């Protein structure tokens, strides 16, 4: 027991001795002239510069980069923003691609949905056109009545009937114009869906 205790004390003493001999770190850098400057505390010449921290054995323990300049910080921020935007665009494209694959099971599905959407819009256009025909028919009644009042002020109900008919015709014409734009947008959408679906279908499956 005494021998073991003595050995333990010797080990602790040796360890403590080595710890006590561990010297402080040394800091080194190169000044404006390229000359190496060192010190046990960071020399003033090393401020705002890259420097090395040396161990007591003279080996480099770590290297500290110089602080970024305002221009470098701006460049780094711009680069981070660019990478962030690229990542956002990539994630958005992945989301759209997955939604596309979840929506359609084949190219035929795309064509079926395209035809259905085009039929719906065509039906809305026909309904608006038919409504214009009906309004114009109703307007002729006010036109015929207005013939009796040439060069005279029209009765209030006749004038209102003509105005209301004209406004309704313009409204329906606006609907038709809007639906025609929708029809073109739908055609472009399904063209792009079909193109992207074919492209994704040709890709090899991702490895698990």
Image (cartoon, helix red, strand yellow):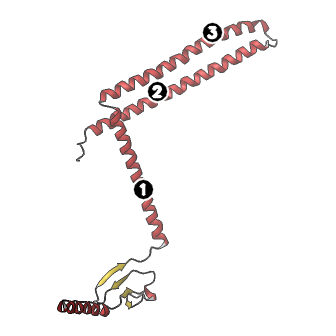
Work out which quarter of the rendered image holds the N terminus and state it: bottom left
Say whether residue 3 is left or right of residue 182.
left
Density class for disc 1 (Cα within 10 Å; few <14, some 14-19, many ≥20) is few
Density class for disc 2 (Cα within 10 Å; few <14, some 14-19, many ≥20) is some
Front disc: 1 or 3:
1
Q: CA distance from mark 2 to mark 3?
A: 28 Å
Residue under the point 24% across and 91% down: 9
Q: Which mark is residue 137?
A: 3
- Do labels 2 and 1 touch, CB within 8 Å? no
Q: Secondary structure at mark 3?
A: helix
| Along the line of sight, the residue nearer the viewer: 123 or 2 | 2
- Residue linked to disc 1: 84
Residue under the point 27% across and 37% down: 201
Residue under the point 43% across and 25% down: 117
Taking 26 as reference, is 108 above or below it?
Answer: above
View extreme (right): residue: 152
| Along the line of sight, the residue nearer the viewer: 143 or 130 | 130
Say whether residue 62 is left or right of residue 188.
left
Taking 156 as reference, is 180 above or below it?
Answer: below
Front disc: 2 or 1:
1
- Do labels 2 and 3 touch, CB within 8 Å? no
Where residue 49 sits: x, y (%)?
42, 81
Density class for disc 3 (Cα within 10 Å; few <14, some 14-19, many ≥20) is few
Where residue 48 sits: x, y (%)?
45, 80
Q: CA distance from mark 1 to mark 3?
A: 61 Å
User: Sequence-wise, which precedes: disc 2 or disc 1?
Assistant: 1
Q: Quadrant for residue 140, please give it.
A: top right
User: Sequence-wise, which precedes: disc 1 or disc 3?
Assistant: 1
View extreme (front): residue: 1
- Residue linked to disc 2: 183
Q: CA distance from mark 2 to mark 1?
A: 35 Å
């Amino acid at each position: 027991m005494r021998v073991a205790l003595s050995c333990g004390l010797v080990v602790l003493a040796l360890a403590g001795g080595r710890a006590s001999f561990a010297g402080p770190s040394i800091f080194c850098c190169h000044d404006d002239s390229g000359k190496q400057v060192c010190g046990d505390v960071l020399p003033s010449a090393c401020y705002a510069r890259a420097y090395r921290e040396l161990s007591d054995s003279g080996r480099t323990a770590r290297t500290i980069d110089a602080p970024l300049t305002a221009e470098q910080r701006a460049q780094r921020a711009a680069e981070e923003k660019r990478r962030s935007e690229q990542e956002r665009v990539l994630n958005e494209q992945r989301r759209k691609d997955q939604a596309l694959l979840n929506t359609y099971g084949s190219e035929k599905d795309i064509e079926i949905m395209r035809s259905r959407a085009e039929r719906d819009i065509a039906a809305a256009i026909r309904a608006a056109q038919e409504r214009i025909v009906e309004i114009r028919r109703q307007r002729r009644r006010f036109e015929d009545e207005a013939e009796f009042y040439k060069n005279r002020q029209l009765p209030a109900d006749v004038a209102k009937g003509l105005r209301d008919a004209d406004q309704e015709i313009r409204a329906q014409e606006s609907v038709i114009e809007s639906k025609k734009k929708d029809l073109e947008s739908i055609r472009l959408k399904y063209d792009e869906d079909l193109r992207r679906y074919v492209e994704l279908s040709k890709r090899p499956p991702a490895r698990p």
